[in-house]
């Protein structure tokens, strides 16, 4: 399992990355996170929905209700241009962090 701190730090870029592929609804986002992480990340609805609502309030995603099977309503989320800009920023930050940590973890003993 991945720590709560790492999970928290990665939640927004993960959600935005999934929505960048196309609109989706909450339960499906949770399933994709589990799939993409090989089961190392297991999100719950109480963890996901506050983040979705915050991203929506900030204009980084938007939602719409759709009628699906058996006339059930389901709320779908999609990324906005502001969300895509944030995703690009987050990608850059995470890429830089991965490079930094990789360099640090591969130091030779005589370089310390």
Image (cartoon, helix red, strand yellow):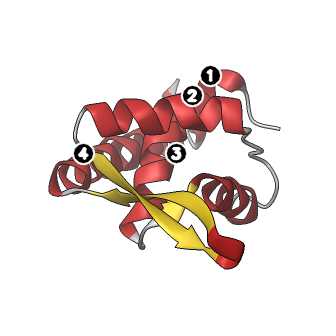
Query: Which class describes the residues within 10 Å of circle 3: few (<14), some (14-19), or many (20+)?
Result: few
Mark closer to the observer (1, 3):
1
Mark closer to the observer (3, 4):
4
Residue 104 seen in render: no
Mark closer to the observer (1, 4):
4
Alpha carbon separation for disc pair 2 and 1? 5 Å
Residue at 48% across / 33% down in the picture? 51
Residue at 50% across / 50% down in the picture? 14
- Residue 102: which numbered mark, if any? 3
Query: Which class describes the residues within 10 Å of circle 4: few (<14), some (14-19), or many (20+)?
Result: some
- Residue 86: which numbered mark, if any? 4
Q: Secondary structure at mark 3?
A: helix
**Residues marked 3 and 4 touching at CB (< 8 Å):** no
Q: Earlier in the sequence, mark 1 or mark 3?
A: 1
Quarter of the image where one finds residue 42: top right
**Residues marked 2 and 1 touching at CB (< 8 Å):** yes
Query: Which class describes the residues within 10 Å of circle 2: few (<14), some (14-19), or many (20+)?
Result: few
Residue 5 point in image, percent of width and height? 62, 22
Mark closer to the observer (3, 2):
2
Q: Is residue 34 above or below residue 47?
A: below
Alpha carbon separation for disc pair 4 and 2? 16 Å
């Amino acid at each position: 399992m991945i720590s709560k701190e790492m999970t928290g730090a990665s939640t927004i870029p993960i959600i935005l990355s999934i929505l960048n592929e196309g609109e989706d609804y909450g339960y499906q986002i949770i399933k994709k996170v589990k799939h993409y992480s090989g089961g190392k990340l297991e999100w719950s609805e109480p963890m996901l929905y506050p983040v979705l609502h915050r991203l929506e309030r900030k204009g980084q995603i938007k939602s719409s209700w759709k009628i699906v099977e058996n006339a059930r309503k389901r709320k779908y989320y999609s990324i906005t241009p502001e969300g895509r800009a944030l995703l690009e920023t987050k990608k850059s930050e995470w890429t830089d962090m991965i490079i930094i940590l990789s360099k640090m973890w591969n130091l030779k003993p005589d370089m310390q």
